[in-house]
Image (tube, coloured by chain):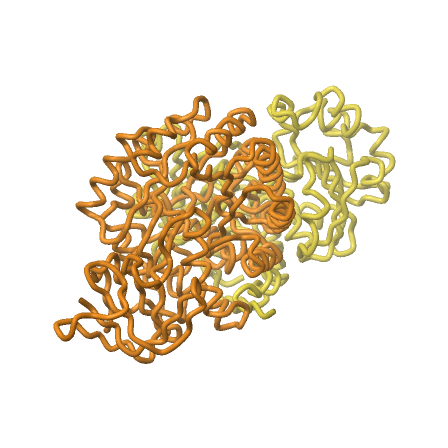
Chain colours: A orange, B yellow
Amino acid sequence: MIRLAGGRILDPASGRDEIGDVLIDDGRLVERLAPNGEAVIDVSGFVVAPGFVDLHCHLREPGFEDAETIATGTRAAAAGGFTTVCALADTRPSTDTGSDVEALLTQALRDAVVRVLPLGTTTKQRAGQELSEMADMAAAGAVAFSDDGRAIRSASLMRHALEYSLLVERPISSHAQDADLAEGGVMHEGPLATVLGLKGIPREAEEIAVARDLALARLTGGRLHLAHLSTAGAVDQVRRAKAAGVRVTAEVAPHHLVLSEVAITDRPYDTNARTDPPLRSIDDARALLEGVRDGTIDCIASDHSPRRWVDKACEFDQALPGISGLETTFGLLMRLVHSRTLSLAELIGALTHRPADAWNLPYGTLAPGAPADVVVLDPDQAWVVDPERFLSKGKNTPLGGQALRGTVLLTVAQGRIAYRNGL
Amino acid sequence: MTLEVLSRPSLAQARQLQPARRQRRHVLDLDDFSVAEIEAVLETAGAMQDVLQRPIKKVPTLRGKTLITVFYEASTRTRVGFEVAAKALGADTVSVAASTSSVTKGESLIDTIRTLQALGADFVVMRHHQAGAPYVVAEEVGPVTSVINAGDGWHAHPSQALLDLFTIRERLGRISGLRVAIIGDVLHSRVARSNLWGLTLMGANVVLCGPPPFLPAAGFCDGLPWNLERTYRLDEALDGADVIMLLRMQLERQTGGMFPSLREYVRTYGLTEERLARAKPGAVVMHPGPMNEGVEIDPRVARGPQSAIEDQVRNGVAVRMAMLYLLSGLPA
């Protein structure tokens, strides 16, 4: 039994914003505790919120344990305030079958400190040739399906995947990028790419793929989820599609909201700022933010992509894309709150009940009876990002040495303390 | 809304914010050069030309220094140009071709460079097929090694741009106010990019000309710190041009779907004597090499009186000597 005493309880799911105690018993949130016997943690002066829910996280295990494992990735998640992470299927072997899903869940039981929810692939081995066994995987516990890291080139295969989503009642998460237009590209196509002599990926690569996927979702009535949107044009399309009743949800990554392509030049050709889709312009970031505010974009997802040192300490074209983001997500996004672009409640909503609602997951709330997934935050504490101190194996971040304001003090996942820092 | 985090200085502003260096360590591009620095290179190159005209074309200035060339891509002019320049200044040179080195065994760029440094390189002259590679190297090398970019992907080729500036000034007596037409595959050209920095800095105006897929899109030239116009029509580019720089057209772009055929390209963009007449009388014709004679340039133009193509190669030695001399910190 734990009593988190005297904090500011901020639960956007219920609109609660008040000073009070949060009570935990046997892994659940409760309204009262049996007298005495509980551990009391004084959290007065801090914010108590539901644990964050991440719809997009690469844990790299099995197959790429040099980059991350379930043990290290979930510890990084806890340090970042996340209590639920949805693990992408681009492992080796990829998560292709019901037994792959079961194996992942079994290993998570042993190694994970927060809840791990597997995604399965949409097509076998993400090869874009045949559909994966989605019904089997759903029965085993897969929450969604994605070939993330690769776009599905064939429109007819994507159509059938969306049709299958009707059977399995899980979304198809799409890495919406036209593979031909993006071929060989390593950054946003625009004046900066012209100067740097790097091959660009035009916004249109995303806009064309989003248009196709939205059209197919309309055709099939299937459940489409758009991963890591990066362009203003995509936000507009999703806004119109939602108004027209298309069953679509969308996420955005923290770096696309707060950073721009200029991050590549902070250090010349900084491979840590290479992402897929690429960091884009300030105007795109503004449009994405507007999408978060008006609900066009359902939620913020970390797109945590840990990489080995050797995969970043190389030529820009050669570097693998991605940012190790779990441990900087909250601090980075707090820049939006400190600059008064987003309220703290809006931000926490976009990290908790909104992702949970998007995929129909029973998390992201402090309602009594819910699983005890709780995070205690200090929105004002300043810190300097030191990748060497990450719990993630991935030290790849363009934020190294930068000051952020906003820290995670305590993370309780399913009633157990998964991370504690200074409380 | 205020997004202070997003409003970082633009590239041009960032350059102005850089503190002026007293002694340059690397030459990675011309984007961080000042006018005074370029002037110093051009003047010193003039002095080096005198050295090269002596009966014994050698001075002991860099005796005891080692220059290593590392080329991940084929080159004749640039690699030999640097080696001849280094030898004329008394330095020892070692040349590494990536195809015969440990690179073929999978050695990473950083390991390769650290190895070369441990072997005692004072100068590393590198050509690489990927943009930005010399910056990775410059971050890695210790305090005594200078890195010179001898061409990285589509990005930069600073020694070529410097020797082009030198050649233009030699022929026409000035750079400022000239109209320079750069013709051909601009998009993939590091020569074009470095010349855009150098020519802009020295006050020339640049006209980029080529088939539309080979020019940066109009919208992608907005706000660039370069003095440039673009046109798809050769006659417009040649009209009033003082200098015509031709770029090599690569046949593999045809199979990549970027243009229909070399035959059509020659008819549309090939520089013939007849077309050259549209430029200013005495306009200078340049080509960084290697040329496709009969494609971007008619052989009669390449060998004609207005061609400075061989001068470019010759001047490349003096200019590279000047670069090495100035990098070694000796007085201008």
Q: Nearer the viewer, residue B107 or A260?
A: A260
Horizontal arrangement in the rendering, residue B118 relative to residue A289 (left or right)? left
Horizontal arrangement in the rendering, residue A321 relative to residue A99 (left or right)? right
Q: Residue at x 55, y 35 (%)?
A: A221
Across and down, in percent, residue B228 comes to 74, 50
Tell me if residue A136 comes above or below residue A382 in the rendering.
above
Horizontal arrangement in the rendering, residue B14 relative to residue B302 (left or right)? left
Across and down, in percent, residue B41 comes to 58, 55
Across and down, in percent, residue B4 comes to 55, 69
> Is residue A356 visible in the rendered structure shown here?
yes
Residue that extends furthest to the left in the rendered view of this protein: A37
Q: Nearer the viewer, residue A352 or B42?
A: A352
Quadrant, the N terminus of chain B:
bottom right
Horizontal arrangement in the rendering, residue A369 relative to residue B258 (left or right)? left
Q: Quadrant of residue A402?
A: bottom left
> Is residue B137 visible in the rendered structure shown here?
no
Tell me if residue B265 comes above or below residue A256 in the rendering.
above
